[in-house]
Amino acid sequence: MVVTYIRSASGKRSMRVTLSPPQVLVAGFALIILIGALLLTLPGFTAPGKQTGFLTALFTATSAVCVTGLVVVDTGTHWSLPGQVLIMLLIQVGGLGFMTMAMIFFIVMGKKIGLKNRLLVRESLNQISVEGVIRLVRAILFFTLGAELLAGVILGIRWAGEMGPGRGAWFGLFHAVSAFNNSGFDLFGDFRSLTGYAADPVVNLAVMSLIITGGLGFSVVNDIWKNRRDKKRLSVHTRLVIITTLILLALGAVLFATLEWGSALRGLPPSGKLLASCFQSVTPRTAGFNTVDMAALRPTTLFLIIILMFIGASPGSTGGGIKTTTFSLLLLASGAVSAGREDIEVYNRRIPFHQVYKALTIFLLSTFWVVLVTMILTVTEKADFLTILFETVSAFGTVGLSMGLTPELSDAGRLLIILTMFLGRLGPVTVAFALAQRRDRTRIRHPEEKIMVG
């Protein structure tokens, strides 16, 4: 934040406060969460016979805007239809980012978008430059609406037979928005998510497609579409995201099936077991839906899901976590050091060292926060260590998977998880930049001296 004093022609002195892009993002998300929480406390947004305290509303609004899906009250029974609509809108704003939504409004109104707003959009979408960000925003709008409406119609038709046309259409739209934005909010009641559809191919394939698409990142989807006829022109970032995502999805599905085939998946037919294994590998991309009971899984499987949740989705997407490219860069850097190479190379391109430093910073800050929150929750909550670690990583990765601890959290635990969801959605580095004082870059470089490592 920069404070400047301006003197007008009449001699009157005024103060101007200038916020940096990270500070604008942090303040904007916080303001949307606060507005959402205040609205959710109003009687009309709560189901008849239910009451909503401010902390419950704040937790729900944070979970929605941060597209997490962790809930302390059941979404389908505690909130009225207006409350559910508000939660869906908060999910949409949080998934696309409030700056993206603001730019969409400016575009629709025909207003000119200056450099400052383009810089904010670049920061919000995690882009490298401002070039083409407005075209990207337009593409995001059409692609998001198209994907959500298409999946919403498919799911609505699937559920119309058992719920009726009106309720089926509403369930289809809500869960399509929730899935595309990697949120994980559901309306089925009793905190059971999609466990009633573990072997249903329509529901599984529709939701998985939305989760994967939303988690790839808007720039990746845009790059794939632009170069659909010439895949050799795809950027290194797009290729790295695709290959990392495919490996994580395949590895997660195989390991889940291997560990749970005769355990948590025991009651399903072979095709249902394969579907459930794939789904449980996709949902830690930070989606939060589940088709099997998380509490019934082996500790080894839970730890596998924790790792996948911590890695999360890709940069510039609706998902959280440290991101697939952060994980890939750390592996590439480790491989280069092990092979004795000075440069980190992938697809015949050299990766700048400052990006590796950023990846390492994200990993260390994220690990530090998860460890810190887990340690505190072991004191404030009555649960075993693995359950607390699972819930913490789920909150930080904005995943929303739960072993049942979240509804039982103390007030202190709820506040910690709220802060963790907020930090996980914005990213630890963005929050650190927002809190740091602005400093001028120094031209001084000190003498080099080596230290012993390892």
Image (cartoon, rainbow, N blue to C red):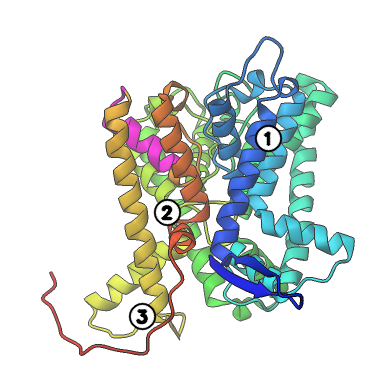
In the image, which residues are magenta? Answer: 382-395
Residue placed under numbered mark 2 in the picture: 311
Dot 2 falls on a residue whose secondary structure is helix
Q: Is residue 75 above or below residue 318?
A: above
Residue drawn at (68%, 59%), measured in percent from left and top? Answer: 99
| Number of marks drawn | 3
Q: Is residue 423 above or below residue 258?
A: below
Place residue 166 in its image quadrant.
Answer: top right
The residues tagged by marks 1 and 3 sit, at their Cα atoms, a distance apart of: 43 Å
Position in image of residue 122 (x %, y %): 62, 69
**59 left or right of 428 in image:** right
Q: Residues within 10 Å of mark 2 (few under 14, many from 20)?
A: many
**297 left or right of 112 in image:** left
Place residue 376 in its image quadrant.
Answer: top left
In the rendered image, residue 357 lying in the magenta stretch gets the answer: no
Hey, what amino acid is under mark 2? Answer: Ile
Position in image of residue 59 (x %, y %): 54, 33
Residue placed under numbered mark 3 in the picture: 344
Question: Nearer the N terminus, badge 2 or badge 3?
Answer: 2
Q: Residue furthest front?
A: 11
Residue drawn at (75%, 74%), measured in percent from left and top? Answer: 114
